Image: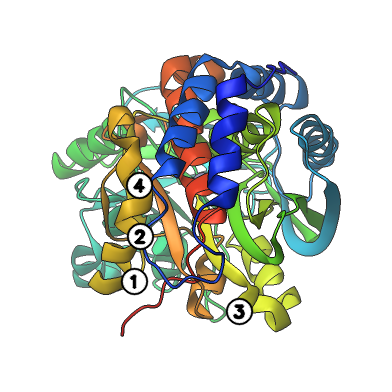
């Protein structure tokens, strides 16, 4: 851990903030002196390497970390050690029961009208093929075409080739392709991925409807799905061989890992900052969501390095099983149901690690206007925008119970080229972006946690 000696000027500033407006004053704006402390926080975070070192270790040493797996147990030990190094006063685990799944060896080949490899990734929680499954392909563009051609489906591998419109639009195919194809008698479902990139498949969770057979499901690449679609349109009746050892295991034990820096004045009030520690097994999970986790750890470490202890408690929650459906997030909200009103804000980073863009808030314009001053000092990082939008999967159950939910936003236009795929590796994270995100989160969270204003910021008058 790099520990800087707090400069005398900073000590003076902290003293100034500590003596600034009375803690009970009802004011919506952070005190002006805080801006100077925030500058120091940002400068320190931009030069610090804690986050990069932690991310490298998570990617290289901990390795793949599906919820409920042995890798996730290594990740828990890593997280606890890193929380200690970041200066957390208290560190604990909260048990969560999670789905468990193993990928095993998997491959696909075009076997007619010629032999050629097909790059693929089995979808999370898919069943396996139980040996090699070979069948003719029926390629369709969307649900409407599937329904129109339902009589052609029995015995086929249905290839879904919807255009890339948005993650939300395409995830519908990833989630439901298997059961909707199985409803008409398909033996497997292959999809154009919920993502793009150069001949890149993208995994992600899928689900089975209760009333249809459970058939294997996998992502092809955009190019692979398009080729099968073209061959099919030419009337060449392509055939594919598919082999997936995937196994759905019984639900099993896992945990959220939590650490906190106790507030100096209102320790019972919690500013929760979060990422999810589980990740797909296809790359390093560096962007999704290793970076989100280390940003939160490093934000805590930055404050600890500078000897800053805000009025309120900052609680880092590293959730499990976001990827399988958010079991960690629901478990936390249920366990802490009696303390919801003590959570003054929840911030999640889970949109990739790119240049900071600000914060999106699941609230009305009044709350957004009141939160904006806390981000205003981050203009030098390009992180001062506060706007309505998505907060995060893991903190969603808290938001539904009334906690102000905030998403850490980044300029992630290229994210879905590597999201849930083999290219989401350590090298794909720009160290400067990572440091800028630590600076963003550390400064914003300090501003909120140290605010003398009464929080939570009310949704409306
Ligand atoms: Zn994620």
Helix, strand or loop at mark 4 = helix
Q: Which residue is mark 2?
A: 371
Q: CA distance from mark 2 to mark 4?
A: 7 Å
- Residue corresponding to mark 1: 363
Name the residue rendered at 34%, 37% in the picture. Answer: 378
Q: CB of mark 2 within 8 Å of CB of mark 4?
A: yes
Q: Nearer the viewer, mark 3 or mark 1?
A: 3
Residue at mark 1 to residue at mark 4: CA–CA distance = 16 Å
Q: Is residue 426 above or below residue 290?
A: above
Calculate the distance from the C-alpha at mark 3 to the C-alpha at mark 1: 16 Å
* CA separation in Å, label 3 and label 4: 23 Å
Alpha-carbon span between mark 1 and mark 2: 10 Å
Q: Is residue 421 visible?
A: no
Q: Which residue is mark 3?
A: 341
Residue at 74%, 50% in the rendered image: 260
- Which residue is denoted by mark 4 in the rendering? 375
**In the image, is residue 247 above or below residue 401?**
above
379 or 171: nearer the viewer: 379
Q: Does label 1 point to a residue whose CB lies under 8 Å from ligand 1? A: no
């Amino acid at each position: 851990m790099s520990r800087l000696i707090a400069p005398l000027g900073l000590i003076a500033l902290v003293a100034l903030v500590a003596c600034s407006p009375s803690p009970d004053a009802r004011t919506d704006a952070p005190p002006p002196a805080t801006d100077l402390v925030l500058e120091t926080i940002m400068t320190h975070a931009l030069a610090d390497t804690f986050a990069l070192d932690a991310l490298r270790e998570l990617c290289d040493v901990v390795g793949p970390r599906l919820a409920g797996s042995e890798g996730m147990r290594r990740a828990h030990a890593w997280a606890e050690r890193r929380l200690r190094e970041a200066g957390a006063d208290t560190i604990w685990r909260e048990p969560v029961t999670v789905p468990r799944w193993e990928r095993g060896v998997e491959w696909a080949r075009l076997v007619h009208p010629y032999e050629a490899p097909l790059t693929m990734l089995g979808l999370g929680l898919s069943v396996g093929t139980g040996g090699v499954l070979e069948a003719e392909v029926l390629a369709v563009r969307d649900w409407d075409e599937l329904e129109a051609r339902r009589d052609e489906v029995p015995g086929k591998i249905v290839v879904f080739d919807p255009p890339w419109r948005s993650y939300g639009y395409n995830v519908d195919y990833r989630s439901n392709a298997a059961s909707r194809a199985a409803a008409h008698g398909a033996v497997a479902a292959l999809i154009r991925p919920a993502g793009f990139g150069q001949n890149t498949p993208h995994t992600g969770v899928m689900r089975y409807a209760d009333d249809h057979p459970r058939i294997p499901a996998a992502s092809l690449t955009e190019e692979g799905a398009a080729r099968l679609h073209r061959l099919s349109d030419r009337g060449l009746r392509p055939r594919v061989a598919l082999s997936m050892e995937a196994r759905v295991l019984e639900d099993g034990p896992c945990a959220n890992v939590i650490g906190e820096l106790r507030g100096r004045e209102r320790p019972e009030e919690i500013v929760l900052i979060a990422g999810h520690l589980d990740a797909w097994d296809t790359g390093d999970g560096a962007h999704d969501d290793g970076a989100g986790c280390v940003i939160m750890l490093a934000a805590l470490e930055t404050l600890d390095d500078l000897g800053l202890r805000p009025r309120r408690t900052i609680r880092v929650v590293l959730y499990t099983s976001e990827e399988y459906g958010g079991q960690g997030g629901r478990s936390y909200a249920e366990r802490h149901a009696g303390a919801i009103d003590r959570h003054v804000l929840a911030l999640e980073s889970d949109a990739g690690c790119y240049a900071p863009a600000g914060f999106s808030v699941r609230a009305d314009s009044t709350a957004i206007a009141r939160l904006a001053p806390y981000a205003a000092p981050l203009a030098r990082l390009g992180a001062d925008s506060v706007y309505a939008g998505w907060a995060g999967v893991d903190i969603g159950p808290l938001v539904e119970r009334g906690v102000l939910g905030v998403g850490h936003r980044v300029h992630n236009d290229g994210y879905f080229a590597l999201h849930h795929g083999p290219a989401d590796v350590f090298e794909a994270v720009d160290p400067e972006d990572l440091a800028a995100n630590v600076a963003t989160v550390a400064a914003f969270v300090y501003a909120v946690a140290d605010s003398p204003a009464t929080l939570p910021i009310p949704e409306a008058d």
